[in-house]
Each structure stands twice: as structure tokens, then as C-alpha cells.
Amino acid sequence: MKHVDVWHEMVERKISFAFILEDDPIFVPFFKEKFNRVIYTAIRTGALKLNKTCLNQSQIKINNQEWINQEPMFVIGTCLDMFDKSFQKNLTNAQPIITTHKEDPSRCAHAYLLTLCTAKAMIDTLAKHPINTDTPDFYMNFIYPRSSVLQSFWVDPPLVYQGNRIIDLEHLETYKGSMYDRKFRK
């Protein structure tokens, strides 16, 4: 329910853009630079428009081709090894991509970006289509396909991983060779 509380707080306080994290994020190396590149790309492509008039759900029909005229959520994390089918994760230095996901919007709810208009649309859609769950991923996967204005984008490769889903930290470059490692290893 904390996620829904955040959406309401964004609307009440008129927060135009928010980065929402759960309590156990693990950031990729050079996160800041990669995050800035995602924001720049989202603005340049028209997927992200800040300080604009929010869309009215009753005036727009659901059309998956009209992603550019919808309120965006950017899923920048992953926890279940989910990637867009067009992303080639096994390539060295794979180019980052942003893809649309109307039917399965949330691969995980531990790291995502919302605009004020997106938060409003999520609250409105949830009010029109209530669901009995306390899992934000399920909320998102339920309300996005039912909304004419909500559009989810996945960022691949992801910029944040869910800490409780990572089993072997030895294969993450950011955990190799840290100063405190030597102190605790035998």
C-alpha cells in the first residue's frame, strides 16, 4: 500500500516527477550517467513530457499505437530476470533501449519513475477498476491495460536490481574488490 500512498502524495503535493524505490535497491555501475541518459532519451523521443496538461481518460480510446500521447511510467529496475524480447542481453555492451509495455507494464515495482499526470491517472483508474491485492506489481498489471492514458516503458538493460532477488553478488562488478571485502574474507 505504500506505493499507492506515494501516488496520492505526488498528487497532493503536486510533485511533477518522482523516482520510486523500495527498500533494497542495488544500482548498476555508473548509475547516475545511465539514469541521465534514460531521462534525456525519454524527453528526446517524446515519451516523457513534464509540466504539461494531464490527459482526460474519457476523451481517449485505448490504442496501443498511441503511446506518445499517454501518461508514462518508466520501469528502470528488474527482479525476475525479465527483459524486453527485443533486448539482446547477452551481447557485450548492448545498447540501452526503451520499449512500451501496455499489457504487462510492471516487471517489478521496486524501481520506477512517474510523472504527476501518471500518478493521477493511476489513482483514477484504480478507483474505476478496484482490485483486492496489496502488491503494487499486480495493481499496475491490472490497471494499465484498462486505462486509455497509462503507458509503461521498460528500460533495458535495467539500472536497478532488487536486492532480495540477487543470490550471487560475486558476479556483480560493483561488489568485487571493495575495501571491506578483505576485512571479512578468510
Image (tube, grey):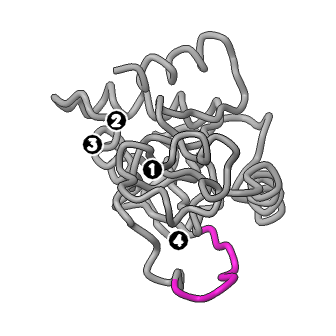
Label 1: how many residues lie within 10 Å, few (<14), some (14-19) or many (20+)?
many
Of tags 3 and 1, the one toward the viewer is: 3
- Describe the element under mark 1 as helix, strand or loop: loop
Q: Looking at the image, which is closer to me, 45 or 94?
A: 94
Q: Which label number is shown at residue 65?
A: 4
Where does label 2 land, which residue? 136
Q: Are marks 3 and 2 in contact (CB under 8 Å)?
A: yes
Q: What kind of secondary structure does the magenta stretch mostly adopt? A: loop
Identified by mark 4, the residue type is Gln
Residue 148: mark in rendering: 1
> Pointer 2 and pointer 1: residues touching (CB < 8 Å)?
no
Residue 170 shown left or right of residue 45 in the figure: left
Question: Crowding at label 2, few (<14), some or many (≥20) Cα neighbours within 10 Å?
Answer: some
Residue type marked 2: Pro
Residue 138 badge:
3
Q: Please state which of the two labelled residues, at mark 4 or mark 3, is closer to the viewer.
A: 3
Q: Mark 4 or mark 1, which has the lower sequence index?
A: 4
Choose top left, top right, bottom left or bottom right for residue 167. bottom left
**Depth order, front residue of 89/18:** 89
**Separation of disc 4 and disc 1 at Cα?**
11 Å
Could you tell me residue 157's position as x and y percent? 59, 68
Q: Residue furthest front?
A: 186
Mark 3 Cα within 10 Å, few/some/many (few <14, many 20+)? some
Q: Which residues are magenta?
A: 90-98
Sequence-wise first label, 3 or 1: 3
Mark 3 lies on a secondary structure that is helix
